[in-house]
C-alpha cells in the first residue's frame, strides 16, 4: 500500500516537472524572439547613440549593463508601437464614406466680357469620416462647388474645383476635381426675330389666329464669335395654349421666350438680349353656313330608281380661314347605293374639307326610298367647254357637234319637271392644243336622284 502511494506521488512530480519545463521552454522561446527582434536591434541603436554621446558614456554604460533596463525599454518601445498601430487601424476600420451626387458647380468669371466652354454642371462629392461626423456634415446647408476663373485670360486652362468644407472632421473628395475650360471674348450682334406658333391645335377649332405682332422685331445676341456665326434664326416660341378663355378680339401674351437655332435646327447656347418679347394676337372666328348635299355612288337595282332622300340635317356651319370658306358651296354626304333593292337608312360621318377646322354637324342620318324607274329624252342641250388652254379658242366642227340629246332616268315624279335648264352638258379640253379633236360628252344635273346619260357620246371640236 505504501509502495503504491509512493509511485503515484512520483508520477505527479514527473508531470509537474514536464509542465514546468514546457512553460520554461515557451518563455525562453518568447524571450529569444524578443531578444532577437527587439532587444538586440534596440541595443545596437543605443550603442550607436552612445558613440554619438561620448560625454554621457558612463551613464549609458551603466544603464546598458543592466539587462532588466534593456527589457523594460524594449517593451516600452514595442508597446508604444503597438498602440500607434492600433490607433491607426482603428481609424481605418471605423471610417465610412458617403457620396453626394450631382452637386452644383458655380463658375466665377466676368460674364459680360467672356464666354466659357467646358464648365461641368455638377460634380460628385465623397465624404469620408466617422458615422457621427458624416451625419453632422450632411445637415449643413449645401454650398456650391466653385470654379474660380476670375484671374484667367482667353485661352484653354486646366482649373481645380474648390469646395468649402462645412466641417473639418470630414474629408471631402471631388469627382471630377479639375476641369479643362476654354475662355473666349464675348461679342454681340443684332438678329431679326421670326415667329413660331406652338400648340395651336389646343385652341378651339372655331377660332382663327391671325395678325400676330411682336413687341420688337430684332434683338441682340451675345457669345463667342464662332457661336454667333452658327446662328441661322432666332425664334419667338408663341405658346397659344396659354391664352386663357380665348374670345374673338385681340389678346396679348407676355414674356415669350426667344431661342437661337443653327441651320440644322439645333438649339444654340447664346445670350439673347432681351430674353423675351410680348406678342399681340388677333382672334377671329370666320364661319359660313352651307347645305349638305347627298352624293349617291353606284346604281340601284335594275328597274328601280331613288324616289326620295331625306336628311336628319340639311345645313351645317363651317369654320376656317376666309379663303377656304370662299371655295366651299356645300358639304358632300356620300352614300353607296350600288345594287340597292329596297329602302335603306345610312349613318354617315362627315369629313372636314381641306382648310376647314370645324363644323357644327359631325354626322347625319340619310333615309333613301325607291320606286319604279322611268325615263325620257331631252334634246338640243347645248354643249359647253371647260379647261381650254390660255390663248386658245374652241368651236364645234358642226351644228350637230354643238348640242346633245340626254336620257334622264328616275321615278315618274322626279323626272316630270326636268328640262334642259336643269342639265349641264360639257366637254373637258384639259391638255388639248390646236387642231381637231374628238372628245367625250359629260353630263350633270341638279337632282341627284336622277341619272343623266348622253345619247351623243362624242363630238368633234376644233381648237385654234
Image (tube, helix red, strand yellow):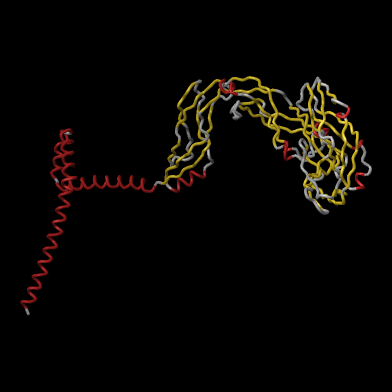
| Residue beneath the point at 53% across and 36% down | 104
Left or right of 101? Residue 390 is: right
Q: In the rendered view of the protein, which quadrant contains the N terminus?
A: bottom left
**Farthest-out residue, bottom:** 1
Q: Nearer the viewer, residue 168 or 156?
A: 156
Residue 17, quarter of picture: bottom left
Question: Could you say which quadrant of the image residue 270 lies in?
Answer: top right
Quadrant where the C terminus lies? top right
Q: Position of residue 192 (x, y in %)?
A: 68, 22
Q: Confirm whether residue 175 shows in the render.
A: yes
Residue 320: image location, x then y, percent: 79, 36
Residue at 75% across / 26% down in the picture?
A: 431
Residue 452 point in image, percent of width and height: 85, 40
Q: Which one is nearer the viewer's eye here, 302 or 181?
A: 302
Please tell me which residue is depicted at 42% across the width and 43% down the height of the picture. 128
The image shows residue 241, relative to residue 72, as above or below, that is above
* Residue 249 visible, this angle: no
Q: Classify residue 412 as left or right of residue 51.
A: right
Percent x, y of residue 262: 60, 26
Occupied quadrant, residue 44: top left
From the viewer's perspective, tell me whether residue 92 is left or right of residue 125. left
Of the pair 403 and 253, the residue shown nearer to us: 403
Which residue is outermost to the left?
3
- As drawn, 213 above or below 299: above
Q: Which one is in front, 250 or 43?
A: 250
Total count of labels: 0
Amino acid at each position: 500500500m505504501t509502495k503504491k502511494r509512493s509511485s503515484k506521488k512520483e508520477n505527479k512530480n514527473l508531470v509537474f516537472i514536464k509542465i514546468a519545463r514546457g512553460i520554461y521552454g515557451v518563455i525562453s522561446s518568447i524571450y529569444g524572439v524578443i531578444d532577437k527582434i527587439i532587444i538586440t536591434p534596440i541595443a545596437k541603436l543605443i550603442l550607436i547613440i552612445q558613440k554619438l554621446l561620448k560625454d554621457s558614456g558612463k551613464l549609458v554604460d551603466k544603464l546598458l549593463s543592466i539587462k532588466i533596463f534593456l527589457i523594460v525599454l524594449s517593451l516600452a518601445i514595442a508597446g508604444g508601437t503597438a498602440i500607434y498601430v492600433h490607433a491607426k487601424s482603428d481609424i481605418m476600420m471605423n471610417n465610412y464614406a458617403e457620396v453626394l451626387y450631382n452637386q452644383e458647380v458655380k463658375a466665377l468669371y466676368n460674364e459680360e466680357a467672356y464666354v466659357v466652354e467646358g464648365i461641368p454642371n455638377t460634380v460628385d462629392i465623397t465624404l469620408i469620416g466617422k458615422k457621427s461626423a458624416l451625419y453632422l456634415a450632411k445637415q449643413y446647408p449645401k454650398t456650391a462647388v466653385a470654379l474660380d476663373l476670375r484671374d484667367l485670360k482667353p485661352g484653354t486652362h486646366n482649373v481645380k474645383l474648390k469646395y468649402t468644407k462645412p466641417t473639418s472632421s470630414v474629408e471631402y473628395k471631388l469627382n471630377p476635381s479639375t476641369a479643362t475650360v476654354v475662355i473666349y471674348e464675348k461679342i454681340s450682334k443684332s438678329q431679326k426675330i421670326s415667329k413660331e406658333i406652338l400648340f395651336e391645335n389646343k385652341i378651339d377649332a372655331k377660332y382663327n389666329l391671325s395678325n400676330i405682332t411682336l413687341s420688337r422685331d430684332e434683338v441682340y445676341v451675345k457669345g463667342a464669335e464662332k457661336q454667333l456665326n452658327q446662328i441661322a434664326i432666332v425664334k419667338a416660341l408663341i405658346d397659344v395654349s396659354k391664352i386663357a378663355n380665348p374670345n374673338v378680339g385681340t389678346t396679348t401674351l407676355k414674356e415669350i421666350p426667344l431661342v437661337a437655332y443653327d441651320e440644322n435646327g439645333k438649339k444654340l447656347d447664346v445670350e439673347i438680349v432681351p430674353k423675351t418679347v410680348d406678342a399681340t394676337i388677333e382672334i377671329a372666328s370666320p364661319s359660313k353656313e352651307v347645305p349638305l348635299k347627298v352624293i349617291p355612288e353606284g346604281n340601284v337595282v335594275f328597274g328601280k330608281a331613288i324616289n326620295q332622300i331625306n336628311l336628319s340635317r340639311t345645313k351645317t356651319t363651317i369654320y376656317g380661314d376666309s379663303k377656304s370658306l370662299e371655295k366651299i358651296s356645300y358639304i358632300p354626304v356620300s352614300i353607296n347605293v350600288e345594287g340597292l333593292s329596297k329602302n335603306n337608312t345610312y349613318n354617315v360621318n362627315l369629313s372636314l374639307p381641306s382648310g376647314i377646322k370645324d363644323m357644327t354637324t359631325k354626322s347625319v342620318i340619310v333615309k333613301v326610298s325607291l320606286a319604279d324607274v322611268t325615263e325620257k329624252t331631252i334634246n338640243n342641250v347645248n354643249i359647253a367647254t371647260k379647261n381650254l388652254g390660255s390663248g386658245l379658242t374652241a368651236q364645234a366642227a358642226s351644228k350637230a357637234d354643238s348640242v346633245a340629246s340626254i336620257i334622264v332616268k328616275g321615278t315618274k315624279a322626279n323626272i316630270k319637271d326636268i328640262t334642259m335648264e336643269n342639265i349641264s352638258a360639257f366637254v373637258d379640253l384639259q391638255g388639248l392644243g390646236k387642231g381637231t379633236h374628238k372628245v367625250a360628252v359629260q353630263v350633270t344635273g341638279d337632282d341627284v336622284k336622277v341619272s343623266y346619260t348622253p345619247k351623243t357620246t362624242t363630238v368633234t371640236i376644233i381648237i385654234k
